[in-house]
Amino acid sequence: MEEVLKQLNELCRDTLVDNLGMVFTAAGEGWLEARMPIDRRTCRPDGALHGGANMALAETVGGALSSMSVPPENRFHVFGIEVNGNHMKQAQGGYVVAKGTFIHQGKRTHVVQVEIRDEYGTLVTVNRVTNMIV
């Protein structure tokens, strides 16, 4: 999986993912993790982690997980068609970690649950990302 993580991180260079400091850190069968800093790029003016940054992290992890599961020789493309999130707590510390796992993995749609936790393991946001495979 190290090679997959390296490829994902390279693919995201000079994109929103890179600009927000997101890095894919771990992966396994049916799951993917990424880390994002809590810093000037991802915070509101009052210093709290911006909810929109969390949503971008969730959609990034959900989309990448779906993309990883689609065989490249089939030439399918993955498009996010819906993302929602519930913010429960303010993140503490210097970073958050998002872990995406499949809820549904059909031929044409994938649904991914993404839990975002701060560096202390506190659940910050729960997201659901729906992707279309075309």
Image (tube, helix red, strand yellow):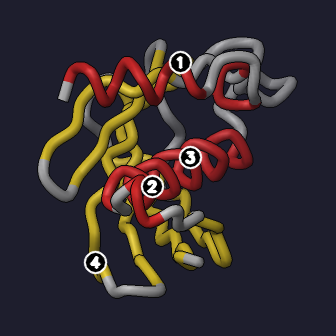
Q: Which residue is mark 1?
A: 10
Q: CA distance from mark 3 to mark 2?
A: 10 Å
The numbered mark, 3 or 2, whose residue comes first in the sequence reads 3
Q: Label 2 sits on what residue type? A: Ser
Mark 1 and mark 3 residues within 8 Å of each other at the beta carbon = no
- Which is more foreground, mark 1 or mark 3? 1
Q: CA distance from mark 4 to mark 2?
A: 15 Å
Pick the residue in front: 34 or 133: 133
- Which amino acid type is marked by label 1? Glu
Q: Is residue 113 above or below residue 61?
A: below
Mark 2 and mark 1: span between their CA atoms? Answer: 15 Å
Which residue matches tag 3? 60
Decide which of tag 4 and tag 3 comes sooner along the chain.
3
Sequence-first disc among 4 and 2: 2
Taking depth in this image into account, of 76 and 131 the one nearest to the observer is: 76
Considering every residue shown, the one lying at the far front of the view is 73
The quadrant where residue 74 appears: bottom left
Q: CA distance from mark 4 to mark 3?
A: 16 Å
